[in-house]
Image (cartoon, rainbow, N blue to C red):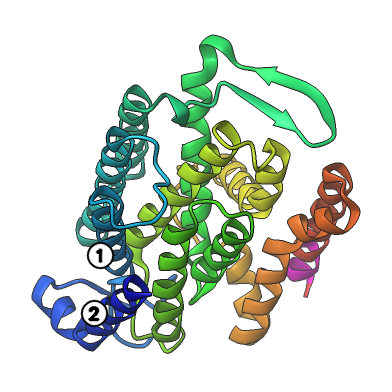
């Protein structure tokens, strides 16, 4: 109980002083009337909030203050924290100086490679499916597949952070799923509390996640997706795919569109589905529709117990929504 009291106190103190922090480190997102349509400079402190909560969790875990240790060894905890810190710092640097996409891809790949070197459970050696006993082994391609999956997850998640609350609300959906499945419960209970605090300020345009937030959150979530499949076998690979299906399709669609137009596949533009939504509907209607699209594949899977049926229905719905948005 005292741990949760300290968590709430930590978050309360952060939000009480967030303006002082943003001024001290000059961490703001400035409107440009193109992709960034907010009205005034807004603190980019979502990543710092998550990072401070993560430090608090690591302190409790490493110090033996939790009744149950979620990591098997201290080396595993240390590796997780170091790589998480690097993702946060990479995002912080990108917020301040706008790092080129190619450099980010290289740095992320190196960080994941280092993580796999120190933690073998982070390597995707095979994938299992809910609908068959067949196991797809990757053998010598395991390291490449793992880096590719991380890159896809991080970039697709980053593309979600286009309108207020979108990436955060989707993260809350995944975190609640993790809590339901009892995956690293205390860590995700902590993140749940901090993100609910943040969401209130985010909707009021008083604070944004920033790249530091999306980078850190995407690494944490992808890390435990892999752990849930590799170590505990709680989630099948096709279930994880369904959870990330719509962001993944959106990433693929945007990358192909940009390549056709002879642009960098990861260069930001106004062709995201949330941009189409905002142009046609109110913010709240756009937000609700997108969130329903994001959670739809996994919800359909729960109803029909068929990942193939969910894939067909969800892809068809996503495609029809895009066609509709482009025609009206």
Residue 61 highlighted magenta (yes or no): no
Q: Left of 94 or right of it: where is 181? A: right
Say whether residue 286 is visible. Answer: yes
Q: Range of the magenta residues?
A: 323-327
Placement of 238 over or under 295, stated as above or below = above
The alpha-carbon separation of the residues under discs 2 and 1 comes to: 9 Å
The picture places residue 286, in percent across and down from the top left corner, at 65, 78
Disc 1 element: helix
Residue at numbered disc 2: 14
Residue 326 highlighted magenta (yes or no): yes
The picture places residue 72, in percent across and down from the top left corner, at 39, 36
Number of callouts? 2
Q: Residue furthest front?
A: 67
- Magenta stretch secondary structure, dominant: helix
Disc 2 element: helix
Mark 1 and mark 2 in contact (Cβ < 8 Å)?
yes
- Label placed on residue 4: none
Which residue corresponds to the image point at 66% horizontal and 70% vertical from the top-left?
A: 290
Residue at numbered disc 1: 52
The image quadrant that residue 282 belongs to is bottom right
Query: In terms of depth relative to the viewer, which is nearer, 182 or 160?
Result: 182
Which residue corresponds to the image point at 18% horizontal and 77% vertical from the top-left?
A: 22
Query: In terms of depth relative to the viewer, which is nearer, 296 or 254?
Result: 296
Say whether residue 37 is visible. Answer: no
The picture places residue 296, in percent across and down from the top left corner, at 76, 62
Query: In terms of depth relative to the viewer, which is nearer, 214 or 249?
Result: 214
């Amino acid at each position: 109980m005292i741990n949760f009291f300290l968590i709430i106190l930590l978050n309360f103190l952060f939000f009480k002083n967030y303006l002082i922090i943003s001024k001290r480190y000059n961490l703001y997102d400035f409107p440009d009337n193109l992709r960034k349509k907010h009205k005034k400079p807004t603190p980019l402190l979502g990543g710092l909030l998550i990072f401070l909560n993560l430090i608090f969790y690591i302190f409790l875990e490493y110090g033996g203050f939790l009744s149950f240790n979620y990591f098997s060894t201290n080396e595993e905890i240390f590796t997780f924290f170091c790589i998480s810190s690097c993702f946060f710092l990479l995002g912080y640097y990108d917020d301040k100086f706008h790092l080129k996409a190619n450099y980010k891809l290289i740095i992320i790949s190196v960080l994941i490679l280092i993580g796999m070197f120190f933690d073998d459970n982070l390597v995707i050696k095979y994938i299992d499916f809910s609908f068959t006993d067949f196991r797809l082994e990757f053998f010598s391609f395991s390291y490449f597949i793992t880096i590719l999956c991380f890159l896809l997850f991080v970039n697709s998640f980053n593309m979600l952070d286009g309108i207020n609350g979108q990436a955060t609300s989707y993260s809350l959906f995944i975190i609640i799923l993790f809590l339901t499945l009892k995956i690293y419960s205390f860590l995700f209970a902590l993140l749940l509390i901090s993100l609910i605090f943040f969401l209130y300020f985010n909707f009021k345009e008083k604070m944004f996640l920033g790249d530091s937030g999306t980078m850190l959150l995407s690494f944490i979530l992808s890390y435990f997706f892999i752990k849930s499949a590799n170590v505990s076998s709680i989630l099948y690979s096709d279930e994880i795919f369904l959870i990330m299906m719509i962001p993944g399709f959106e990433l693929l669609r945007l990358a192909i569109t940009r390549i056709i137009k002879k642009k960098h596949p990861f260069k930001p533009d106004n062709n995201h589905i949330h941009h189409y939504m905002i142009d046609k509907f109110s913010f709240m209607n756009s937000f609700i529709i997108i969130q329903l699209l994001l959670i739809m594949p996994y919800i359909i899977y729960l109803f029909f117990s068929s990942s193939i049926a969910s894939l067909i229905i969800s892809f068809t719905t996503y495609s029809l929504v895009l066609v509709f948005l482009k025609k009206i």
